[in-house]
Amino acid sequence: MTYTDRFSALTSWLDSTHGGQAFTVQPASEDASFRRYFRIGLGKTTYIAMDAPPQLEDCESFVRIDRLLEANHLHVPHIYAADLSLGFILLSDLGKTAYLDKLNTDTVDRLYGDALDALFIMQTSVPHGTLPPYDEALLNREMSLFREWFLQTHLALKLDIEAENILAETFGLLTENALAQPKVFVHRDFHSRNLMITDSNNPGILDFQDAVSGPIAYDLVSLLRDCYIAWPDSRVYAWVADYHARLVRHGL
């Protein structure tokens, strides 16, 4: 089905979900996958429509994890309607303001405080036993992206045997460390572009559909060593120490 065909099918589906009421459709955001998002205007309320071709995207995973997080009072998009056979989902709109847009030295403690509160709930309350494991194969597959895309494609480096051995040893140490950590719900992309500033129950959380059961440090690193924004080591270490103490008090 072409782009135009899917858009026509989406608008027809939206028409049926809204009982024929007039609505507007505008592109909402880009995504590094085959998913597309549209902002739907219906009266004074806006919604988000997800178009995720079922042959290319796992809509069932999104719905399952969305409901799992919402059941634990985390602020994820509420699902109003879904047709998984078509790959269409109608969601609440978490707004247009990502953490990255507002993070600065004056706001970071408050915003990260909210984000760490949400992470604590994810790690201590959200069941993770039925999620795919962040196992050795997945860890190595993802670390290999560093070699393939950063070193070889972006930097155009051809590694010699010594460099390859160093890289393999490093990957082995990281894998061993990750597998030895306590296992919790892992979002996998818990950073400033996937956290939205909301008026209540901040933050809104997006892009969670690839969640796994894995190492407790992973999402904390994603947030505090964010590839989109950097903070002085002294602040990062202080946030880590506070969060670590909080987990220890909880028995982790």
Image (cartoon, helix red, strand yellow):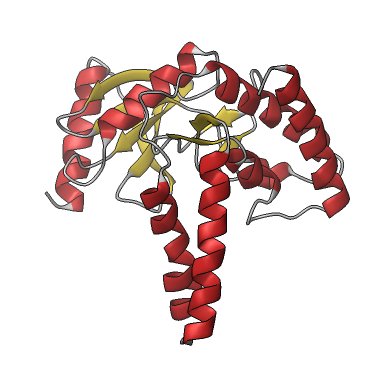
Image location of residue 224, percent across then percent down: 70, 45
* Identity of the residue furthest to the left in this view: 1
Q: Quadrant of the C terminus?
A: top right
Query: Could one spot residue 117 in this view of the protein?
Result: yes
For image coordinates 39% across by 35% down, the residue present is: 209
Residue 79, compared with residue 103, is above or below; it is: above
Image location of residue 129, percent across then percent down: 40, 23
| Between 172 and 144, the one nearer to me in the picture | 172
Horizontal side, residue 170 vs residue 232: left or right = left
Among the 4 quarters of the image, the one containing residue 63 = top left
| Between 173 and 54, the one nearer to me in the picture | 173
| Between 237 and 89, the one nearer to me in the picture | 237
Image location of residue 98, percent across then percent down: 61, 40
Residue 161, compared with residue 86, is above or below; it is: below
For image coordinates 35% across by 24% down, the residue present is: 130
Report the number of discs: 0
Among the 4 quarters of the image, the one containing residue 223 = top right
Among the 4 quarters of the image, the one containing residue 80 = top left
For image coordinates 56% across by 54% down, the residue present is: 174
Image location of residue 243, percent across then percent down: 75, 31
Horizontal side, residue 145 vs residue 215: left or right = left
Query: Could one spot residue 157 in this view of the protein?
Result: no
Horizontal side, residue 140 vs residue 122: left or right = left
| Between 30 and 133, the one nearer to me in the picture | 133
